[in-house]
Amino acid sequence: MNLAFLTFFLPRPGNRRKHKRVSAPLMIPVLLLVGGLMTVLPSTRAHGSDVRVSASVSSTHIAVGQQLTLNVEILSREPRTVSRPELPELDGMQYVSSLPQTSSRYSLVDGIAQMSYRYSYSLLALQEGTYQIPSVYVSVDGRDYHTRPLTVRIRPPGQEGLRPQARRTQRPDMFLELELSEERPVRGQQIVAEIVLYFRNNIEVNNFHVTQSWQTEGFWREDLNRSPTRRPESIILDGAPYRRAVLNRYALFPTRTGELSIPAFTIRATVRQSGRFRDEYSGFFDGFGEQRNVDLATPPMAMRVLAPPTPPGDGQLISALGQFRVERTLSQDVVKLGESVDVVTEIRGSGNLGLITRPVFEYPSSFDTHRPREVIDRNQRSPQMSGTKQFRDVLIARNAGTFTIPQNTILVYDDIRRQYERHTLPALTIEVVRDPNARITIAQDHRIRLTPIRGSVNWSASTQRSPWLTWWFWLALVLPAGAFAYGYKNYIYQSRLTNDIPFSRRQRAADTANSMLKGTSEITGTKDVYGVIQNAVNSYIADRLDLPNAGLSIDEIATALKSRNVRRPLVRRVRTLLEKCATIRYTPDPTARDMMSDLGEARKLIIELEAEI
């Protein structure tokens, strides 16, 4: 994994002043131009759907009398009207000033625009103990948003170190920390874990890579490294200036209660230091400006996971913990007899999205239920696990009439408010009508029960019937004709496979791609497996759409799928998998679990695309 962005945003001391003079004037006309264009052009996005509000502190462990910085950041893809944050009351700390330092930034990455508004407040530690900074509320375009609470530990003055179990007399010039959004979670709660590198201003970090797999036993882990990475920021630790950079970001979900341990996260960084220093923590530098490889690791952490409180008895649990909205709709209100209707349950928000279970509803007996479908549309650029999970129950109408799916209540545990919230799903009404154009209508009434007729039996001798009135006569007549028709149809099909190349490619696309994926079992390198996955998906789409087998970019593939009216979530999943396969060579070796998951995703995409194109 490359860390070139650290070096890029770390100008040497002699160039910092010049860097500021050039960038500041250029940003003003860019911001004005973008703001004017956003005002003139109509927005195609739902209001507020792209707004992200987060809070962070410069340090979670400080001493009495020291200061820390509280940063409130608002991210959006277009300019917004943002009010000044409402500051909560603090325990154990106080605000140095109620007037924040403000900044805004516009960036364009991979064709995606992003506006960032930041408010920074200085806090002074007053009293020893563990305190919580409550949620900060911000109004964006008249709509209220709030951040997650933050935990800060304040130690007595004169004691150094981050934790009682890892105290040291002096901080090293470069060290690695694991910072968690929550240290006393409940089972299933989302914990955002950031791997943070701290280093002095005279150190330049060129790149780094993970030296061993991070095994988080007892946690379900999701990778959040596709979310926007924060730029290195300058902070003060124990009176000394440091730079702080987030290297990796993960979402951890504890799967059991009790004491759990998080092992060390190890990296090897390539660094260069512009001065000479040596101490017991950073003695690996012994020359002026010489490049070195440095091994760093986070301290192991112990965590106590609590059980969620007892839920109320007037709702249904679906194992959802976080900030979610639950909605239920019908694909259509009026259906014809024998047709299908989808009951769509959508859970949208942030939290343990992948662990949410399907809600169970009571359906009228006049409907046959089929195997439900489950789709997850994850927001890859969110700094936490968020997105939409959708369940589709397929119902087949067997009787005409008007039917009602009863009202339901879904319980979601809000890990910020520490309480269960009820989401009421109103009753849904389905009208089933007969098709007047249907020649034969088959209706099945499950309420009819057949009973045997008891009584005497009268036997009568059968009369001789003509051969053409017997079933075997017609069977003997139809079988040869059917065999001949089947053979002729198969001959036409095989001839077309041989002579019609586009038709042959379409028919054999799935078999060819699945054969390529099956061959990955003989490949030892995980990155080579991702190359086969990319070739299999590219080959399948090219064969199905009659496109060239080579030279297709990811954007061209996505455009071709959209032109065939393929569902946008499915196109996004194809793009995500191909981008991961294309960039996997620049990242550390993925785990076997991630590789198997991506192999399964490729097979699912082929099956779903088979029904679309």
Image (cartoon, grey):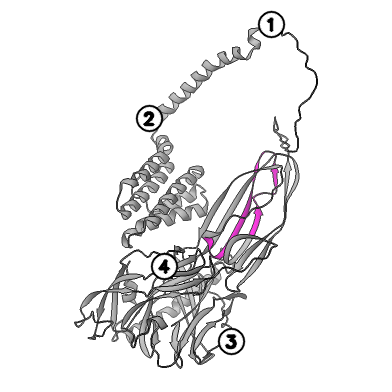
Q: Residues within 10 Å of mark 1 (few under 14, many from 20)?
A: few
Magenta highlight on residue 337: yes
> In which quarter of the view is residue 244 placed?
bottom left
Is residue 141 something that shows in the picture? no
Q: From which residue to which does the magenta span run?
A: 327-353
Is residue 411 something that shows in the picture? yes
Which amino acid type corresponds to the residue marked 3 in the rendered image? Glu
> In which quarter of the view is residue 283 placed?
bottom left
**Cα–Cα gap, marks 4 and 3:** 37 Å
Which amino acid type corresponds to the residue marked 1 in the rendered image? Gln
Which residue position is annotated with label 2?
Answer: 498
Q: Residues within 10 Å of mark 2 (few under 14, many from 20)?
A: few
Q: Nearer the viewer, residue 303 or 239?
A: 303
Mark 4 or mark 2, which is nearer the start of the sequence? 4
What element does badge 1 sit on? loop
In the displayed structure, does residue 43 sit left or right of residue 457? left
Q: Nearer the viewer, mark 2 or mark 1?
A: 1
Which label sits on residue 464? 1
